[in-house]
Amino acid sequence: MVEFALILIPLLILVVGIIQFGIALNYWLDMNRLSNQGARWAIVNAYPGCTDTDSSGCGTSLQRYIACQRLPGALKPTVDISFPSGGSNKFGDPVQVKVTSPFTFRAIMKLGTITLSARTTMRIERDASRYSAGSFTPTTCP
């Protein structure tokens, strides 16, 4: 009984640490999916809510649309779209979508905060006219 009592606390800390690492890994994978989808929408110059059939313009920016996609409630991602080749947004030039979010390890004790980051770069297939470079951090999403 005494040996079990001595090993219980380190064992619980180890198990909770493994669980927290798994949660952080899952969030990072979600952010990678989001940056990939955002880059794909950027290279074809169309995203849900802003397509070729829209005559009134887009209802929301691409950055906002990406940031407000369904993610775990703990993440409030910042989405940054940039054109690494000197700001050119023409056919064949690269567009980069970067998604970052702080993640706090909420184990038995607060161990600290790290920044999770995902970045995707693709070549533009249609000139970018429906979005521009810039960052967006959501405060609320619909």
Image (cartoon, grey):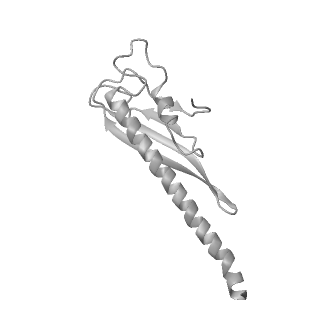
Viewport quadrant of the N terminus = bottom right
Residue 111 image position (x, y, % from top left): 65, 60
Outermost residue toward the top in this view: 55
Residue lying at 54% horizontally and 40% vertically, measured from the top left: 77
Residue 99 image position (x, y, % from top left): 48, 41
Residue 97 relative to residue 10: left or right: left
Viewport quadrant of the C terminus = top right
Vertical comparison of 23 with 73: above or below = below
Vertical comparison of 82 with 7: above or below = above
Q: In which quarter of the image is residue 126?
A: top left
Vertical comparison of 19 with 82: above or below = below
The answer to whether residue 89 shows anywhere in this view is yes
Residue 91 image position (x, y, % from top left): 27, 27
Frontmost residue, 102 versus 92: 102
Residue lying at 35% horizontally and 24% vertically, measured from the top left: 128
Q: In which quarter of the image is residue 9?
A: bottom right
Residue lying at 57% horizontally and 44% vertically, measured from the top left: 75
Q: How many labels does the image show?
A: 0
Outermost residue toward the bottom in this view: 2
Frontmost residue, 95 versus 36: 36
Frontmost residue, 78 versus 66: 66
Residue 3 image position (x, y, % from top left): 69, 87
Residue lying at 48% horizontally and 51% vertically, measured from the top left: 28
Residue 88 relative to residue 107: left or right: left
The answer to whether residue 96 shows anywhere in this view is no
